[in-house]
Amino acid sequence: MLALLPALLAAVQSPVLIIPGDGSNQLEAKLNKPSVPHFYCSKTSDWYRLWLNTADLLAATSCWADNIQLIVNATTGYATDAPGVTTRVPYWGTTLGFEELDPSIPLHGTAAFYQMVEQLTAAGYERNATLSGAPYDFRYTPDSVPSYGAALKALVEELAARANGSKVTLVSHSMGGLQTLYFLRQQTVAWKSKFVAQWVSISAPFAGAAKEARLFASGDSEGLPVSAAAVRDEQRSYETNHWLFPTPGAGSPWSGFVLAKTRTANYTADDYAAYFADVGYPVGSVVHKRVTGLLPHPENGPGVPVLCMYSTGVDTPLSFDYGEGDWAQDPTVTMGDGDGTVNVRSLRVCEEWNATQAEPVRVLTYSGVTHSDMLKDTRVLQELLSTVQQSGQGA
């Protein structure tokens, strides 16, 4: 009887499809470059792991940055891979590409969704059958890669068919929440009603994160032992870093808030054009204007049942003082509430959805759990498992 337990559990569980966060997707590259920044950088290569490749990132940061940096079209605001660089996202439809970002690091040292996947498989889920994944190139916004939305829709339908018509639970973390919200808003009410049981959103930056203001000015080492200045240009080139910038507009929770300042100027989310010009990245305004239109009114829900989970009580970058306006220097940082990465005013946007959609929105908050640790926290994982099991029983 015990041997039958996993199969019995799987029979009543909603199939799970994970949409990972920003840096939680592996990315592969192939090189045939016309030039390189240094003689020791490779001009050619067969397919290899570009993100995360810890050895390349730490040992030859400028070579790595030159390979992953995008080229932004100053007229359209869209970006492309650098000349001679071809990229691809491996392991579509599986969780393999985001369980561990750099499998060469021992003891699960770069684990992302590893613990979550292990918990789900222990409860009877089967990788690539009832448990699937939808990785993406985290540098591009979804309108730049429309094939992603089409493939995601087909994958949801495939998962439901495998489970004899059971509706699918979407699970996202961090920027995966923006990807999921964008995707769901593109679908019809009838399609969502037929194929989506619910959406479990974990730590989503629905209105952006203040730390992006530092990224565009002086770069952000993201806790890695590299110079922020060495990665600033490649970080600026990502379309998605504009998506993660605090949202402008009168209805934004950032309205009127000073994100960055110098001795002579203050910059709010609505001052993005002046900010990008002053920090030396004027083309950013073109990208930003396009990207901020992708998810208008984040306070409006996705039209499916939602479980929104986030944590507070962790010091989180809130504003940045650049003194005399030396953007090459590290700013003085004022901290606020959040999960260490995303500010509470952005995390709690989902609380407004009960007023804008008929489908139920349940919000669970935690205290003192960091942004990345939400993927490992025992309470979060237990709640996730309970939620998908209950959804399956009600299907």
Image (cartoon, rainbow, N blue to C red):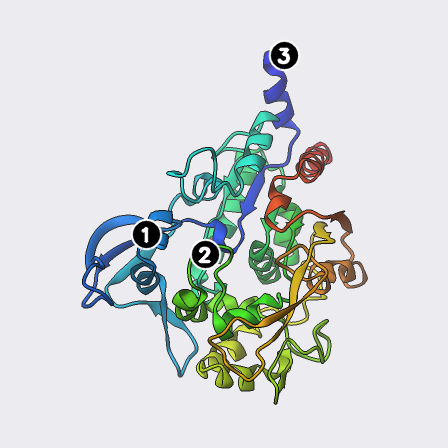
Q: Amino acid at mark 1?
A: Asp
**Would residue 257 be found to the left or right of residue 286 on screen?**
right
Task: Say the numbered circle drawn on residue 2.
Answer: 3
Task: Tell me how far mark 1 sits from mark 2, CA to CA.
Answer: 28 Å
Residue in the picture at 34% in, 59% down: 61
Question: Which image quarter holds the C terminus?
Answer: top right
Of 161 and 317, nearer the camera is 317
Residue in the picture at 45% in, 71% down: 236
Instruction: State the SS at label 3.
Output: helix
Q: Residue tagged by mark 1?
A: 56
Res 226 → quadrant:
bottom left
x and y, in percent, of residue 24 in the image: 49, 49
Of 285 and 19, nearer the camera is 285
252 in relation to 117, above or below: below
57 in relation to 207, above or below: above
Q: Which of pointers 2 and 3 lies earlier in the amino acid sequence? A: 3
Q: Residue tagged by mark 2?
A: 148
